[in-house]
Amino acid sequence: MRLVAEGDSLLFPAAVRRLAAGRGNESARRVLERAALTGREREVLRLMAGGLSNAEIAGRLVLGGETVKSHVSSVLAKLGARDRTQAVITAYESGFITPG
């Protein structure tokens, strides 16, 4: 409840991995390639896929909370994702993140 109240999405990494397992979605690969994410945005997406909240990502990358929000927003915009869950699914489907 606190995560959602703070504007974060609740992700269940195990469920997302099961959903994406075995998929090699070519269109998701193209979306990720066209997105041209920066190195930092790629790091943020990896941590999002790990189920970390914005605050946890900020701590891990030694960034401010607003900076992380900015990176997350940029990742969502570049991927054309409406929320964190959709961005993470795209990352798994593209092969950018692999289950396990």
Image: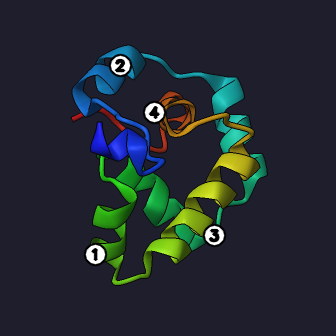
Which SS class for mark 1?
helix
Residue on which the image places disc 2: 21
- Which callout, 2 or 3, points at the residue further toward the start of the chain? 2
Quadrant hosting residue 92: top left
The x and y percentages for residue 81 are: 67, 36
Q: Secondary structure at mark 3?
A: loop
The numbered mark at residue 97 is none
User: Marks 3 and 4, how far apart in space?
Assistant: 18 Å
Please identify the quadrant where the N terminus is shown.
top left
Neighbor class of circle 4 (other Cα within 10 Å; few <14, some 14-19, many 20+) is many
Q: Identify residue type, mark 3.
A: Thr
- Asked whether, in this view, residue 68 is left or right of residue 51, the answer is right
| Image location of residue 34, percent across then percent down | 78, 48
**Residue contact between numbered discs 2 and 3, judged by CB atoms under 8 Å:** no
Question: Which amino acid, by three-letter code, is at mark 2?
Answer: Ala
Quarter holding the C terminus is top left
Q: Which residue is mark 1?
A: 59
Q: Residue furthest right?
A: 34
Q: Tell which circle, 2 or 1, labels the residue nearer the N-terminal end.
A: 2
Badge 4 marks a residue whose secondary structure is helix
Name the disc covering residue 92, or none.
4
Amino acid type at mark 4: Tyr
